[in-house]
Image (cartoon, rainbow, N blue to C red):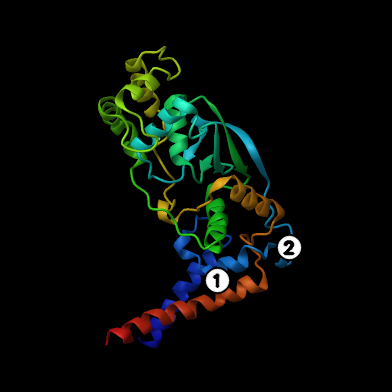
């Protein structure tokens, strides 16, 4: 590699890693190194400003499900419908307690299928969420630091929220005819009984079907242009982990905001050289 190209590559990597913390755009999970994340997740109080990383939060907070917005496009109609039918049958999954993290501009970081399922049943329903007083873009970055520090990888996503409403009638017909093809497993007759329990259906499965089709059209279908794909989004699983990450944000322990601690800054400065050397090694290995 020519020296000029090496310099340009190092500068490019430096911009990526400087953007990884304190950015006004969401930083994808794959752009945060494990080393950087492990330092940043515990050094918020070591940056000379013990207040800059403190975030207000409330868990749980009641929110109208119809006012929540998606931060990822990957939402599978069949999975959301199965969740809705399972909730009508025996309350599983619990769609009223979503265990979802929500930004101050109304974007959900996770739990998109539970959100879609609750909307199918009643877009005016109140749900409990974990509210964090950060814009969605900054919240993704902070939570991705947590995710990468925990050694987790992003989850693959399928489906497209933009076609959710258009796809729902066919999925409903499939379930009515054949039963669900995923958890929670219901046969065709059980599906009809559950559709009759949709609020306003009054026991008529056809009415329940039409209500769900109407509600599906109310699901917000536009995500922010800078939103990462599902595989680059945060992964926070279960009430205990949710409580832990919310607590760290409230105490200002995650160094997501500028100024950064000396250890974080040092790691950022080291990353370009480490990353720039990788392509050179790969080229030599192929010779």
Q: Where is the N terminus found, in terms of image quarters? A: bottom left
Task: Look at discs 1 and 2 and give the one toward the viewer.
Answer: 1
Is 278 in front, or is 82? 82
Q: Is residue 171 left or right of residue 281?
A: left
Residue drawn at the location 37% of the way across and 39% of the way down:
161
Residue drawn at the location 56% of the way across and 44% of the way down:
101
Q: Is residue 136 left or right of residue 283?
A: right
Disc 2: CA contacts within 10 A as few (<14), some (14-19) or many (>=20)? some
Q: Where is the C terminus found, in terms of image quarters? A: bottom left
Above or below, 39 against 178 in this view is: below
Per the rendering, the mark at residue 43 is none
Q: Secondary structure at mark 1?
A: helix
Residue drawn at the location 56% of the way across and 65% of the way down:
37
Q: Position of residue 273 (x, y in %)?
A: 48, 81
Disc 1: CA contacts within 10 A as few (<14), some (14-19) or many (>=20)? some
> Circles 1 and 2: CB distance less than 8 Å?
no
List the residue tagged with mark 1.
Answer: 35
Q: Position of residue 185 (x, y in %)?
A: 36, 34
Q: Position of residue 100 (x, y in %)?
A: 54, 42
Above or below, 184 against 8 in this view is: above
- Which quadrant of the view contains residue 164? top left
Quick one: label 1 or label 2, which is nearer the N terminus? 1
- Which quadrant of the view contains residue 103? top right
List the residue tagged with mark 2.
Answer: 49
Q: Is residue 173 left or right of residue 125?
A: left
Q: Position of residue 270 (x, y in %)?
A: 54, 78
Q: Secondary structure at mark 2?
A: loop
């Amino acid at each position: 590699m020519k020296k000029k190209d090496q310099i340009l590559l190092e500068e490019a990597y430096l911009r990526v890693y400087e953007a990884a913390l304190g950015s006004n755009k969401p930083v994808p999970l794959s752009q945060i190194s494990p080393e950087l994340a492990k330092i940043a997740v515990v050094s918020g109080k070591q940056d000379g400003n013990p207040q800059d990383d403190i975030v207000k939060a409330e868990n749980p907070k009641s929110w109208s499900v119809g006012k929540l917005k998606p931060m990822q496009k990957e939402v599978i109609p069949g999975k959301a419908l199965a969740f809705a039918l399972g909730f009508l049958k025996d309350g599983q999954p619990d769609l009223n307690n979503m265990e979802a993290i929500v930004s101050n501009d109304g974007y959900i970081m996770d739990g998109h299928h539970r959100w879609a399922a609750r909307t199918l049943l009643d877009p005016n329903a109140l749900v409990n969420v974990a509210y964090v007083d950060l814009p969605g873009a900054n919240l993704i970055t902070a939570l991705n630091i947590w995710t990468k520090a925990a050694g987790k990888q992003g989850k693959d996503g399928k489906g497209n929220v933009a076609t959710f409403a258009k796809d729902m009638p066919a999925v409903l017909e499939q379930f009515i005819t054949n039963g669900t093809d995923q958890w929670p497993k219901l046969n065709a007759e059980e599906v009809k009984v559950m559709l009759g329990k949709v609020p306003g259906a009054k026991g008529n499965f056809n009415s329940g079907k039409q209500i769900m089709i109407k509600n599906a059209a109310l699901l917000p279908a536009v995500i922010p242009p800078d939103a990462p794909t599902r595989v680059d989004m945060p992964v926070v699983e279960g009430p205990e982990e949710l409580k832990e990450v919310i607590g760290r944000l409230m105490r200002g322990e995650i160094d997501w905001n500028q100024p950064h601690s000396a250890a974080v800054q040092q790691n950022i400065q080291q990353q370009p050289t480490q990353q720039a050397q990788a392509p050179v090694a790969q080229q030599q290995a192929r010779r």
